[in-house]
Structure formats: structure tokens, C-alpha cells
Amino acid sequence: MIRTILIASLLSAAPAMAQDAPLTAMTPDRIESYDFVRESADYIRREAMVPMRDGTRLFTVTVMRKGTKDAPILLTRTPYNAERNTSRSRSQKIEEILPVMDAEFVQDGYIRVYQDVRGLYKSEGDYVMNRPLSGPINPTGIDHATDAHDTIDWLIKNTPETNGRVGIIGSSYPGFTALMALINPHPALKAAVPQSPMVDGWMGDDWFHNGAFRTFAFDYILRQTTKKGSGNVPYTNPDQYQLYLDAGSTADFVKKWGLEASPTVQKMMAHPNYDQFWQEQALDKLLAKRKLTVPTMLIVGQWDQEDSYGAPAVYKALEPQDTNNDMLHFTIGPWRHSQVNAEGSHLGPLTFKGDTAREFRVSVMKPFLDEHLKSSAPKANTPPVITYATGADEWQTSQVWPMAPAKPLYLQRGGSLAFTKPASASETRYTSDPARPVPFVPVPHNGRDRTTWTTWLVTDQRFASTRPDVISFTTDTLEQAVHIAGQPMVDLYAATSGTNSDWVVKLIDVYPAEAGENAANAGMHLPIGIEIFRGRFVHSFETPAPLTPGKHENYKFGLPHVNHVFQPGHRIMVQIQSSLFPLYDRNPQSFVPNIFHAKPTDYKAATQSIAHSPDKPSAIWLPIVPD
């Protein structure tokens, strides 16, 4: 009997054994797959293709520590590769495979989810850069709001370890998708943390600032939208100042490097003005039309080199709805773009008291999310506004933003600044030549260098002070501290001999020549805020018009929001110039219908005039906090 059973078992196994070909020297060596998550891993990692309402499936990765239960979900919808975000290394420890900022969350039982937005990486569908909300320019009925809703619905039904509460978080583009999730939100969405979100690509985020185009967008566009041949624009000259200058106009640059095939580039060049194309994508305006029902924390860096506009604009749009001052929270940290998720003890020449980013994530951001997402958590008592006062090196809280009304600091004869109006009429002139634009950092420079790009907003401005096409106005040495907390506003009376002009205004903290313990920064001209305004839009962002040569126009625009203390012994400086190149494209200084297509003969030198007189009192309005 035993022998019969043995033979039967061998016969039954024979077909399976026959399928395994003998291993020889010519056996193919590639295997179909390998799961780097081994049995010893302290986490679970799941991949899924999550169906949307139109049948498109989006690649989604869920990560949690083994044994997790009754847990909240923290979701990020990203164009930056969900697989890579959940496999930073091939470690068997959960903290090592996820981004650094996730450590505190997964250590405390959160379920972390990353998803590729439609059309990118492993997700199906068509990718549209900053896909607009369904409406006049998007008739499909599908957008990031619907995709977020469908994703959350699937997650709470297919993640048995969850408590059914979802938060959404992300910085930059994922900050944009986090904001989109607030439009007709899923009932399970209980909190949102948009960080440095892309909100209005024309007014002040990635693509334009007040109508001036940011040329470095081309590298991002080519990397983001190209299926084959993706990467930066294929030039090798590390001196971008000379590279863009030699190229001519923006259209000339586009043609030289074959970028005209990009739909994204075509769209931007076809819409140089603030028309419906841009207005229908402006999330601050779209959100203002809807009731805020999800507790939201908006975060931005004071020196955010990419998306300084979005978070404050959304706060301004939504704050009037928050009558109880408990649904909307606003944070400014002493950071570059997205530094809230990185190490935050320094930025360029500045050193802060400890890791400000981790301190904020642990002490403020996580308790906020815990309160709204965990099944049981203490009330966080998150302040409506929390900002880091640079210059004083401390976190400060407030019930309102700005923290104080604005007070004008007037430009004066002889390059001085004072809180009193000029007593007599005067003006300061300089010549702006598009053939010699003012660089945004010292030349030669390579904006692709990470250190250059992430710290240009804190670059010592002494390199520009000696140029004849940069004019400076400075206070006397301060006898007491001047604390500003809000948005400095430019109120400039300026004229040009041309028919178009750019105006760049910088607010600067001038350090003492002898800085004591801070000797490395002695004499530094630290920029607190820098912004540009394209003159053709002085009367209308939708319909530009030529400037009248010699006529002083009143230009009003904001610098980035700040909390900064100018210390005693320092001075306050305002610098004005008419180019910031090649970060922004050159203004030809003669009016043309579309600056992208300016011809060589359109670029002309012009005499610029800044008025500082009783009837044209150019000033910068500072939100000065009383002692």
C-alpha cells in the first residue's frame, strides 16, 4: 500500500517537474520580478490600480507598519513617481523607504499612501499640466478634485486597517492636488495640508510673476511632459546668463531647442496675458466661491523660490469664511521651496536655532493632523497663524494675518528712506539696457545647480549695488528694531522713455559692517523680498497697453509675505531695477503684442525715472508690528 501511494504521488508531480527546463549555460538569466519587501520587513507595502469614475486606473502605493489597525490614511497625489516615493531605499525598515517627513507619522501608526496622477508613471490616462477644474476650459468632467474623491472612496473601502479618516498633504504640485481635493470633498477627507501649492501660474507661482515669464520653466516642462527623450533642455553651457542672452527672444530659444512641439509651451506662449485660460485655473478664486468644510493648514517658506504666491493667496481668499478662526491655519517658515519636509537649521548664509522644519512638523503639523484624523487624540489648539520671525529667530503665533496695518516708508532725494513724505519734488534716473540685463545672481551662474537655485532669494545683493542700472534707497542706522509681519506692498511712481518696462523691487536688510558673533555675514545685503511687475499690465492684466513715454504711472504690487525683524544697528534698503535675468525673460522696453516673439530690433535701451515727491510719493508699505 505504501509503495502504491508513493508511485501515485510521483506520477501526479511529474507534469509540474517536466515544466521546469534543465538549467544550462544558456538558460536566460532575467527574471520577471523581485519583491524587495522581505518577510523580515517591519511594514506592509501594497500596490493597486485604483479605478476612477471614467474607468481610468491610477497607480497607488499603500505603506503601513505591520500590525497597524484603526489608523488614519495620509494621502499624497503626485506627478513625481509614487513608486520612487515609497522606495527611497530597499530597506526592511519603514522609515527608510519613505521620505524623511513621513517618519513621525508611520512611527505613530499612520497609513501612508502615494498615488501617481493620471497620465504619469504607472497611472493610466492623459496628463495635462495643472489639469483645470471641470468647467469652461475643461469640459471632460474629470479633474484632480474628482480623482481625489474617487481615490479616497476606494481607499476607505479597500484598506481594512483604516479608521475611515483621510488627510491629504503635499508640497508644490502635490500641494496643488491637495487644494483641488477641497473642492466637493469626499466626506472621509478630514484634514488638508497644502505646502507651497501651485495656485496661480500667471500671478505669482511657477510660470509668470505679474506677467513676467520665468524662463527656467522649460527644463521642468520637458522633464514633466515628455515620454521619450525626457530630461532638461539639452544645452551644456553652464553660464545661463550668456546662454539666454545669446538666444534672443523666448520664441528664439524655444525654436533653437525644438520645444515648439510641447503643448504646454504652446499654451503658455499663446496666453501671455491674464485671460480666461489662467483665470479659470486660479485656485484661490475657485476656492473662494465654495464653502471651506475641511480643516486646512497652508504652509509656505519665506524664501520660496518657486511658489511664494499660492498659500497666502488661498489664505486671503478663504479667511473671511473662517468666522470661528478654527478651520484655516497659515504658516510661514524660514525656508526655501518645500523645505518644511527637509532639514531646516539653515538656508544659504542664514543659520537658525535648531531644525525649524522638524520642530514645526512634530510640534504643530502632526498634532493638527492627529486631532482631525486619529480615532482619539487631544485637541491640538493649533493657532490660526504661526510664523517664524527671521532676524529674531523665534516662532510667533497670531490670531490674524497680517499682524499689523501697513505704514509707508518713503523714497527720498539722495537715496534715503524715511517714514515722512518727501518735502520737495525730485526723481532718480537710470538707464536700463536689454543688452546688459541685471542678473538675478552673480554671473556666471548655473540655475540648474541646486545650491544656486534653492538659495538665490537669500543671495547677498551687494553684487548688484554697484551697477549703474540698480538704484538703492537706505534708512539711517536703526536705533531700535523694526518688526514687520505681513505683505510689504510696493507703491511706485515710475516712468520710462520707452513704451514698456519691467520694475523689480527688493526689500533688503543691510547688516552692520562689524557683525560681532555673526562675522561671516558682516555687511551683508540680505533680501527679505524680491518681486517683479511687467509695466504693460499697469492698468489691466487682461489687456496690456503701451506705456506713454515720460509719464509716471503708479505701480502697486506685493512682495512675498514675511515675518522679519530688522535689528538695531542694521539698515533697511530698497533696490529698484528693470530686469532680473535670466530668471525672467527680457522686456524689450518697446511695446509688442506678444513679448515671447519680440524681434532683435524691438530691444531698446530706455531711461527710467523713479519719482519721490509730495504728489508722487513712491513708497514701500511695511506691516510694522508695534513694540
Image (cartoon, rainbow, N blue to C red):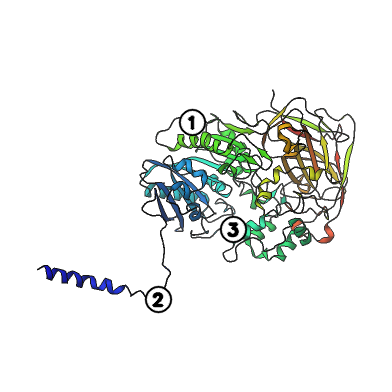
CA separation, marks 1 and 2?
A: 65 Å
Q: Quadrant of the N terminus?
A: bottom left
Q: Is 285 in front, or is 266?
A: 266
Circle 2: element type: loop
CA separation, marks 3 and 1?
A: 38 Å
Quick one: label 3 or label 2, which is nearer the N terminus? 2
Q: Is 174 in front, or is 445?
A: 445
Q: Which residue is mark 3?
A: 224
Q: Which residue is mark 2?
A: 25
The disc at residue 206 is: none
Which residue is found at the position 65% from the left and 37% from the top?
351
Which residue is found at the position 43% from the left and 39% from the top?
108
Where residue 282 appears, x then y in whole percent? Answer: 62, 47
CA separation, marks 3 and 2?
A: 43 Å
Circle 3: element type: helix
Question: Toward which corner of the image does residue 611 lie, by quadrant?
Answer: top right
Answer few, some or many: residues within 10 Å of disc 2's Cα (few below 14, many 20 plus, some between 14 and 19): few
Nearest to viewer (mark 1 / mark 2): 2
Relative horizontal placement of residue 595, taking residue 370 as reference (left or right): right
Circle 1: element type: loop
| Residue type beneath disc 2 | Ala
| Residue type beneath disc 1 | Ala
Where residue 437 appears, x then y in whole percent? Answer: 81, 52
Answer few, some or many: residues within 10 Å of disc 1's Cα (few below 14, many 20 plus, some between 14 and 19): some
| Residue type beneath disc 3 | Gln
Quick one: label 1 or label 2, which is nearer the N terminus? 2
Answer few, some or many: residues within 10 Å of disc 3's Cα (few below 14, many 20 plus, some between 14 and 19): some
Nearest to viewer (mark 3 / mark 2): 2
